[in-house]
Amino acid sequence: MTATVITGLLPILIYFWPAPPKGQKQGRITVTLGTAIDQMQDGIAERILAPTSPNSAFIMRDGGGDNAAGDLAFGGFVVKNKGKVSVLAQNCSHLGCSVAFNKDRASFDCPCHGSRFHLDGTVQQGPAAYPLSNLDWKEGQTSKEIQIEGLTLGF
Ligand code: FES
């Protein structure tokens, strides 16, 4: 009975589901770095924030725990690790607090419950059980710019 009601109502619910706010647009968000990509030192991460004018967010490519592909992140880190540059979301996979770069330990540390992540985003110490999420990115117009997949929220 319940399944029949849900099956019958589903098309109606989908039809009336609210549309995304006007002006919301998915695409590449340009972020300007303090250090050019080709000048970054190995083992160093640079914090980045999604632009606020207009309000924007980065879109996670993958995830686990509290994070999932398609979730939004309002900040992250560009990190060079063993010669490879990657861009990670700042959201801890345990319960979503923002991690901080610990230069002395070359790790990302969560202030909430003590999780620690390696520079490649993998877990070094729990309680987090999943790595940090990756953000899709590509080089921008200049060596100090990168373009990250994101969402312009339109407000
Ligand atoms: S939210 Fe990061 S360790 Fe709990």
Image (cartoon, rainbow, N blue to C red):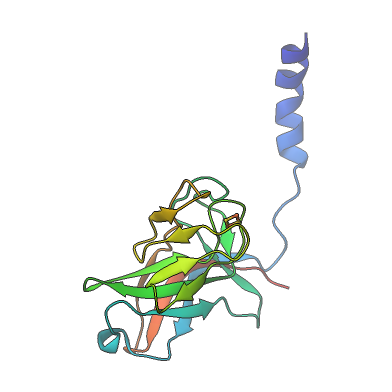
Q: Nearer the viewer, residue 117 or 4?
A: 117
Q: Residue furthest top?
A: 1
Residue at screen point 43% across, 63% down: 135
Left or right side of 86 for 132: right
Quadrant of the frame with the C terminus: bottom right
Residue 114 location in percent, x, y? 55, 59
78 to the left or right of 38: right
Percent position (x, y) of residue 118? 37, 62
Horizontal side, residue 136 vs residue 71: left or right: left
Residue located 28% across and 84% down the image: 41
**Relative vertical location of residue 110 with respect to residue 68 in this rendering, above or below:** below
Q: If the picture is divided into quarters, which one holds ligand 1?
A: bottom right
For the N terminus, the quadrant is top right
The image position of residue 47, as x and y in percent, is 48, 79
- In the picture, residue 23 is in which quadrant? bottom right
- Residue 8: give x, y in percent of width and height: 74, 19
Residue in view at x 36 percent, y 82 percent: 140
Picture layout, residue 148 above or below residue 42: above
The residue most toward the left is: 83
Between 136 and 42, the one lying in front of the other is 42
